Image: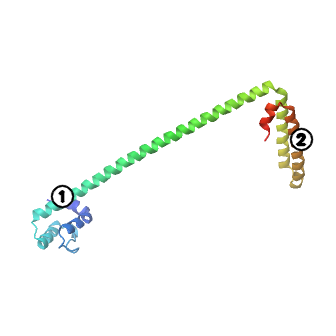
Amino acid sequence: MINVDKLSGKWNEIRGQVKQKWGKLTDNDLTFANGNVDQLIGTIQRKTGEAREEIESFLNETMEKGASILQQAKDTIQNTAAQVSDTVRKGYQKANETVHDGYESVNERIEQGEEKFDEFVQNRPKQSVLIALGVGIVAGAGVAMLLSNRSQSCYTAKAVNKDAKHFWDSLMSSLPESVSSRFRS
């Protein structure tokens, strides 16, 4: 016995296989009107001379194959989705580890820089004060340029640039060569 609901739900898929098996059938012959299976089977019997049992058996097998193919497709899609999900998860974990390692590396370098800075300040307090003074003057001049009007800032920028260069040169000459060579371009 044919399940009418299954047949009507998959009729468009099954129709091509029915036409392939029995080439004498036309599209009009295969009109599945209002789910009338008996009328469909009767039409196929008249046109082909096949027995009703053979027609029903073919239709049932074709529906089962279609269901099996759909199940295989569903399983394949689920497996592929699981693989993609796993790959994305592993990629995310690797990226997270890389970012964490990079952060740790930068943090270590900052700590090393702080230690060297502290050592420099402790070993050379006069030069450290001069550097801090120079940085303060340059920063103050920069703020002054930003706060002054445009025509004055052009003059101030030139004067500050000249003064800053002079200050920098005198600062570098007061430092030991091993330190000042690191700051020269």
Q: Position of residue 134 (x, y in %)?
A: 84, 37
Q: Quadrant of residue 98?
A: top right
Three-letter amino acid code at disc 2?
Answer: His
Query: In the image, 173: left or right of 25?
Result: right
Q: Classify 105 as above or below 144.
A: above
Up/down of 146 relative to 26, above or below: above
- Please name the residue shown 87% across and 34% down the image: 173
Is tag 1's residue or tag 2's residue first in the polypeptide sequence? 1
Q: Nearer the viewer, residue 2 or 117?
A: 117
Quadrant in the picture for residue 110: top right
Tell me where residue 47 appears, x and y as whole percent.
13, 73
Q: In screen coordinates, is 139 left or right of 29?
A: right
Question: Could you tell whether 147 is left or right of 88 in the image?
Answer: right
Percent position of residue 86, x then y: 42, 43
What's under tag 1, amino acid-wise? Glu
| Residue displayed at 22% across by 56% down | 65
Camera-side residue: 18 or 7? 18
Q: Which residue is mark 1?
A: 61
Give how far apart the Cα atoms at labels 1 and 2 are. 96 Å
Kind of element beneath mark 1: helix
Residue underneath mark 2 = 166
Where does the C terminus fall, quadrant-wise?
top right
Q: Quadrant of the N terminus?
A: bottom left
Mark 2 neighbour class, 10 Å CA radius: few under 14, some 14 to 19, many 20 or more: few
